[in-house]
Amino acid sequence: MQTTYSVDVAIIGGGIAGLWTLNHLVHQGYNAVLLEHQGLGGGQTLASQGMIHGGMKYTLGGALTGASEAIADMPDHWRACLRGEGDVDLRGTKPLSEHFHMWSTASLSSRLGGFLASKAVRGRVDPLNREQLPELFRHHSFRGKVYRLVDMVMDTPSLVRTLAANMAGRLFAVDWHDADLVVDDSGACRLSVDNGNAFSLSAAAWVFSAGEGNEALLTKVGSSTPRMQRRPLKQVMVRHHLPYRFYGHCLGAETTPRLTISSHPLSDGSQVWYLGGSLAEKGAGQSDAEVLASAQAELADLMPWLNFSDAQWAVLAVDRAEPRQRNLARPDQAFADWARGADGTALNAIAAWPTKLTLAPNLARQVSERLLERELRPSGAPPPALPLAAPPIAATPWATAFGVADATA
Ligand SMILES: Cc1cc2nc3c(=O)[nH]c(=O)nc-3n(C[C@H](O)[C@H](O)[C@H](O)COP(=O)(O)OP(=O)(O)OC[C@H]3O[C@@H](n4cnc5c(N)ncnc54)[C@H](O)[C@@H]3O)c2cc1C
């Protein structure tokens, strides 16, 4: 006789979306589990720049937009969670930085300068005077302007570890070579595993939070909507021993930052500057050698007083996976909606993409709303002891590229 386990909610994919949603639902009393096929965080989450932002990055056209308004209160939400006062307990996670910066190399266009000094953004953007400048810019040849944002930066490895530790006993490694997701005539999904220990798992609802893996999962269950888009990036990683830890966007002529820098300390005392922004968006269409050359030229142009001659360089090609938008536009909000079969059958699976690390709390709230729409309430039942191992936590791309562990690992 094959054992059948059942839960309120089964989540597939253990990046920020799945881990946050699991924490949120369990906190509400749902009997929920999560299945991961590789390492927790190993998709976009540990490849992200860790910025929890209040949307100021989206105001570089000189006005507040839908995107900037939608996430304005996220830094406060995350700070409450870090204090143990939010929907998810993040005590144990260390922010890498309490602030993010925006800087310009010379005077800003009067429109943007006026906007950044306006009442509309007061409290979210502070212009810094010379004495308040981050160490990196206290060089006599720096002529630009620097602003401090309310945004903060999470250490994503410790974030993933904390979210996973909160949910011990509810995280399971799935190997699709001996597992299958099947759908019955009523649109209910079921996991069937035969690893020498045959069992099946049914759930009142499934949540697909597998990042770009959602595409294959949706196809597998015969779903035609929602659909996914990929927006490719080529990030650059530079490992060096310079003393500057810096987190910031360089303002350019475009409405996306010219360059975004986040700093990630390694266990041997070196650090990685992780470079994104326009550099990485344009880099998606370039060879690795071209994007590296652009990164080196950008740093030489923006910070000519720094010497990277001993640095090591690497490139990471990574796609952002999101709900499909018209013209491949950047979505403004987290997304969670019920999947439908090609013939319109309502499946019991929710497809979920946060679209930003920052919006994970928003995503989890939307998943809860979707569940309540179908009257799916928490049962309060304990987790099942599925005969599956716990999944490992993945390494960051820079730890993998340079063979040195993160300082916080
Ligand atoms: C380079 C880069 C920088 C970014 N920087 C920021 C930033 O600074 N701030 C911000 O707010 N956002 C940022 N983002 C966006 C943010 O990282 C993503 O929106 C977010 O991490 C997506 O999380 P996720 O859990 O949906 O997906 P992922 O993190 O990709 O996780 C998906 C998980 O599902 C697993 N999986 C896949 N298929 C299956 C399957 N079939 N079965 C089981 N498991 C499966 C994967 O192994 C993985 O663990 C950045 C994105 C990128 C690419």
Image (tube, helix red, strand yellow):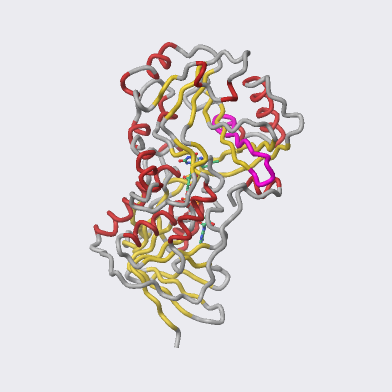
Q: Is residue 130 above or below residue 348?
A: above
Span highlighted in magenta in the image: 266-282
- Give the number of callouts: 0
Seen from this angle, which residue lies furthest bottom?
1
Counting from the top left corner in percent of width and height, residue 197 is at 53, 81
**Residue located 39% across and 53% down the image:** 89
Q: Is residue 313 above or below residue 81?
A: above
Asked if the stretch drawn in magenta spans residue 267, the answer is: yes
Q: Is residue 221 above or below residue 107?
A: below
**Residue located 26% across and 64% down the image:** 376
Q: Is residue 186 left or right of residue 190?
A: left
Residue 287 lies in quadrant = top right
Q: Is residue 388 left or right of residue 380?
A: right
Seen from this angle, which residue lies furthest right?
310
Counting from the top left corner in percent of width and height, residue 284 is at 60, 36
**Residue located 60% across and 40% down the image:** 264
Q: Is residue 84 left or right of residue 97?
A: left
Counting from the top left corner in percent of width and height, residue 175 is at 56, 68
Counting from the top left corner in percent of width and height, residue 33 is at 42, 66
Pick the residue in front: 370 or 187: 370
Asked if the stretch drawn in magenta spans residue 120, the answer is: no
Which quadrant is the N terminus positioned in?
Answer: bottom left
**Residue located 55% across and 40% down the image:** 232
Q: Is residue 369 left or right of residue 13?
A: left
